[in-house]
Amino acid sequence: MLADAAGEGALEVLCLGDLVGYGADPVACVETVGERASAMVAGNHEHGALGLLDLRWFNSWARAAAEWTGEQLDRGHRDFLTGLPLIRTVADATLVHASPRSPEEWDYLVSEEDGLQVFGDFDTRLCFIGHSHLPGVWSVGSGGPDHAGRLDRPEAHVRLDDGRRYLVNVGSVGQPRDRDPRSSFVILNQNMLEFVRLPYDVDTTVKKVEFIPQLDNFLGTRLLDGR
């Protein structure tokens, strides 16, 4: 993803959280993205691994993964992740992992109503989210509300019209859940959003998860189906 974005001329990398939590390479993820990203926010899985979130909030697979992940992080990694805000503004975009409304509640924005009701909770033209791992776009403007919770095509271009505001779920690089196993991310180029899907070595990722006893094999095999 980083190489593809650089090849497209991306000037900045913005990260919406959950660098760690389910995968077998938490340290590599923190260090690689930490070096490349110009702005980041924390996700619920960082908070779980750091002990900042009650692990009873997670299912049993995620709880065990968070505990194991926390054991892999040294003091420097923990300090870095602890310092990440839950919400921040970059130019005319708000970055938040879950929702701009009470981000510490980790609400999922999935339905049309979910997204449209939070436009009053950010002031920027754009708001980028993740959390549900499902790519989608909500917008409001003089022409009324609009919602594309399931994009017509996995790879899609969405034009940003003057006078409208947008809430964008970018999907997930590491664990897409829309039945497409390819990584999902968004490139913003002036007034155009490009939803990019890239294949990666899923089989190796699955084997890495299976090699670690504390990580349930389901956390790897689900990647094969994009769920």
Image (tube, rainbow, N blue to C red):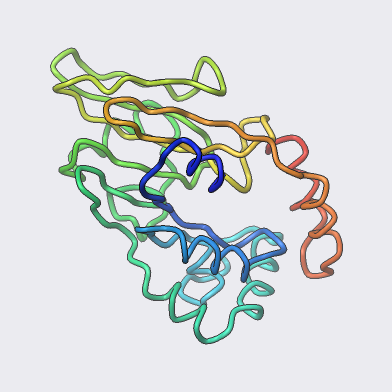
Q: Percent position (x, y) of residue 85?
A: 33, 65
For the point 36% across and 61% down, the residue is 104
- Left or right: 137 in relation to 172: left
For the point 39% across and 51% down, the residue is 14
Q: Percent position (x, y) of residue 167?
A: 32, 34
For the point 54% across and 23% down, the residue is 155
Q: Percent position (x, y) of residue 218?
A: 79, 51
Quadrant in the picture for the N terminus: top right
- Left or right: 125 in relation to 6: left
Residue extending furthest toward the bottom:
75
Q: Is residue 192 above or below residue 25?
A: above
Q: Percent position (x, y) of residue 132?
A: 51, 42
For the point 62% across and 34% down, the residue is 198
Count the numbered circles shown: 0
Q: Is residue 64 above or below residue 136?
A: below
- Left or right: 52 in relation to 27: left
- Left or right: 106 in relation to 208: left
Quadrant in the picture for the C terminus: top right
Q: Nearer the viewer, residue 202 or 146?
A: 202
Q: Nearer the viewer, residue 38 or 218?
A: 38
Q: Quadrant of residue 147?
A: top left
Q: Nearer the viewer, residue 6 or 179?
A: 6
Q: Nearer the viewer, residue 199 or 167?
A: 199
Q: Is residue 185 above or below residue 137?
A: below
